[in-house]
Image (cartoon, grey):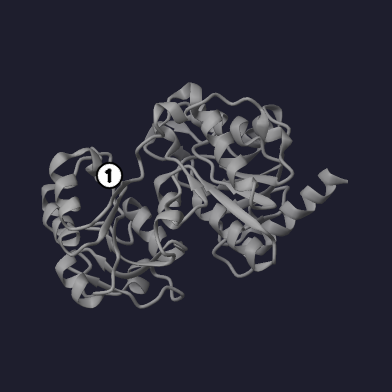
Amino acid sequence: MDLRSAFDVPAPAIVLAEGEFGTPHGKTANGVVLHSELFDARAVVDSTTAGRTASDCLERPDVPEISVVESTARALEVAPEAAALVIGVAPAGGQLPESWVADIETAIENGLDVVSGLHTFLSEDDEWQALAEAHGARLFDVRKPPAADRLRVGDGRVDDLDADVVLTLGTDCAVGKRTTTFELYRAAREAGLDAGWVATGQTGVMVGAHRGTVIDRVPADFTAGVVEEMVCDVAEAHEIVFVEGQAALTHRAYSGVTLSLLHGAWPDSVVLVDEPARRMREDFDRFTVDGVEKERRLVEALSEATVTAISTWADDPASVGYDLPAANVYHEDGPETLLAAVRGSLSVTHD
């Protein structure tokens, strides 16, 4: 999905994050407020943190002082210029909570497009579609997989690219692969590089990746092909492509998605993302985290890529004992440190 072509970027937006703004379950809303090149968040809807600001909720002084309010109706008073409502939380079970209906209806009735990360597809519901048509609004379901006629298996065409490809992988889920991908992309742009990026999760699509698909909704046989096609599309217009990874090769539940990403992107360089204090896998208390070295060995055994750097959440990366360049992307010069390692690896590869 390419949301960039659907909006006049950056589009003023209201972010719906009911009950979860500033929490891990609100990571899509958090990401849109922090990083989006596609949407300019003007207000956040979350009745549990109403009256605070986005900077306060996210504990980031560099975030604009965006108001957090109790309803879409109030958000429209704060931001009457809003063009879109971004649903930034996917609740447990993936269904649309009844308590959110009024907020979404208010947005549509005021002509706002709705960009949804719900598992329930609003664009396939007759009532939502009729309401949107009546008010000139559009419905975008970012979790919707590509149509059947757009699916193909990977065929290796990524090997012919002139662009460099950099993939973020990790030692577990929810360690910051999307954040690292975006920060590398942004650092590359600030360094004057002609960079683009590919998202493989809903947050990245909403943040404004040049191409994006929620990859865990794609049938297994076609995952590598969908990734390959997105990388090739972005590489046509850019000299370096950053690709968001998912899960981990050592993760017993999700390694199939990770391997398909690795083979579809067929990167020149890989940045591993690690939370060094984590011992058990996120949401899987029977599975232990296998660590950087095992993940690195598998990446390099299953591809022609080189693992060139570690994006870590450690407060003091030097104290962890990594044998590769390591940095925290939220530290000053953290993204630049990782980018320097990547560029050094790519120059060796080209030599």
* Front-lying residue, 315 or 8: 8
Vertical relation: 322 (above or below) 94: below
Residue 253 visible? The answer is no
Image location (x, y in percent) of residue 159: 71, 33
Mark 1 lies on residue: 118
Secondary-structure class at tag 1 = loop
Quarter of the rendering occupied by the N terminus: top left
Instruction: Choose top left, top right, bottom left or bottom right for residue 282.
Output: top left
Q: Residue at x 77, y 48 (%)?
A: 346
Task: Return the x and y of residue 136 as percentages of the image width and height.
Answer: 22, 57
Give me the residue at 37% from left, 54% from top: 28
Q: Which of the 4 image quarters holds residue 201?
A: top left
The answer to whether 243 appears left or right of 284 in the picture is right
Q: Between residues 332 and 151, which one lies in front from this camera angle?
A: 151
Q: Which amino acid does the dot numbered 1 rest on?
A: Leu
Taking 282 as reference, is 129 left or right? left
Residue 318 lies, in percent from the top left, at 67, 58
Q: Looking at the image, how many numbered discs can be counted on the residues? A: 1
- Identify which residue, 67 or 295, lies in the foreground: 67
Percent across and percent down for residue 123 are: 24, 42
Point out the residue furthest to the top here. Answer: 221
Mark 1 nearby-residue class (10 Å; few <14, some 14–19, many ≥20): many
Q: Is residue 307 visible?
A: yes
Question: Where is 308 relative to 255, above or below?
Answer: below
Picture quadrant of residue 224: top right
Q: As displayed, is residue 303 above or below residue 65?
A: above
Q: In the image, what residue occupies the spot 61% across and 61% down? A: 316
Taking the image as shown, residue 313 lies to the left or right of residue 95, namely: right
